[in-house]
């Protein structure tokens, strides 16, 4: 959790977002497998199970009108149990899952109606998740949260523009995600 390649993680997260928004679930699972491995370096079985849980949580969350946030939280809690066991971390998996799905909610509100979910609300939700799972000072992880929120804004523009996998917006999104993960890595080592 505290030793990852920001370029690999940012690139894989960009791919995961792309496949999520295109509802390419097999490709999303492959991206998740690689992302979970690169981010958390769990063994193969935990990586496979973790990626499956991330896929299922995202599928429960995906429908914009009739999603299942409770099921998404339960699945993400199981994912964070795997992370905690692999890392000997001290966080509560259910609390981590609540924070994870909370940023999903805030992002959706911001994406659909900026008046209901501001960019600052999104930064705070991401900051709170990072601070909690990494046991970091919220101020130290804020830059990582800001960059990731900015990447989400670029992703939202990409979605609005038609979700073209050749769109240059994906390169901008990827760059912001790489910078976000580099900032996160630097913050957890302060």
Image (tube, rainbow, N blue to C red):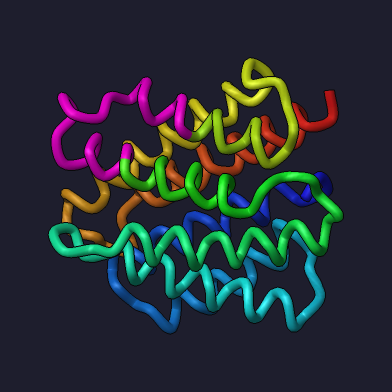
The residue that appears at 48% across and 55% down in the rendered structure is: 14
The residue that appears at 70% across and 21% down in the rendered structure is: 137
Is 15 on the left-hand or right-hand side of 77? left
Instruction: Reply above or below: 27 against 91.
Output: below
The residue that appears at 73% across and 38% down in the rendered structure is: 134
Nearer the observer, 27 or 132: 132
How far across and how far down the image is residue 48, in percent?
65, 80
Total labels: the figure holds 0
The answer to which quarter of the image holds residue 188 is top right
Instruction: Reply above or below: 54 against 73.
Output: below
Name the dominant secondary structure of the magenta segment.
helix
The residue that appears at 78% across and 68% down in the rendered structure is: 42
Identify the image quadrant of the C terminus.
Answer: top right
How far across and how far down the image is residue 8, in percent?
67, 56
Is 127 on the left-hand or right-hand side of 106? right
Instruction: Reply above or below: 109 against 160.
Output: above
How far across and how far down the image is residue 160, in percent?
17, 49
Nearer the observer, 118 or 26: 118
State which region is magenta.
Answer: 106-125
The answer to which quarter of the image holds residue 95 is top right
Nearer the observer, 164 or 18: 18
Is 188 on the left-hand or right-hand side of 144? right
**Most extreme residue toward the top, as rendered?**
139
Q: Is residue 35 magenta?
A: no
Q: Is residue 123 magenta?
A: yes
């Amino acid at each position: 959790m505290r030793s990852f390649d920001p370029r690999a993680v940012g690139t894989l997260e960009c791919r995961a977002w792309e496949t999520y928004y295109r509802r390419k679930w097999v490709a999303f699972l492959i991206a998740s497998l690689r992302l979970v491995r690169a981010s958390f370096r769990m063994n193969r079985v935990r990586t496979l199970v973790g990626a499956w849980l991330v896929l299922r949580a995202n599928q429960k969350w995906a429908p914009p009108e009739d999603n299942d946030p409770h099921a998404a939280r339960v699945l993400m809690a199981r994912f964070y149990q795997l992370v905690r066991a692999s890392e000997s971390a001290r966080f509560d998996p259910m609390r981590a899952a609540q924070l994870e799905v909370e940023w999903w909610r805030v992002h959706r509100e911001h994406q659909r109606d900026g008046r209901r979910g501001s960019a600052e609300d999104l930064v705070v939700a991401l900051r709170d998740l990072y601070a909690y799972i990494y046991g970091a000072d919220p101020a130290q992880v804020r830059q990582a949260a800001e960059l990731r929120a900015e990447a989400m804004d670029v992703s939202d523009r990409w979605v609005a523009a038609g979700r073209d996998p050749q769109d240059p917006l994906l390169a901008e999104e990827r760059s912001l995600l790489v910078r976000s993960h580099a900032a996160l890595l630097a913050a957890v080592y302060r």
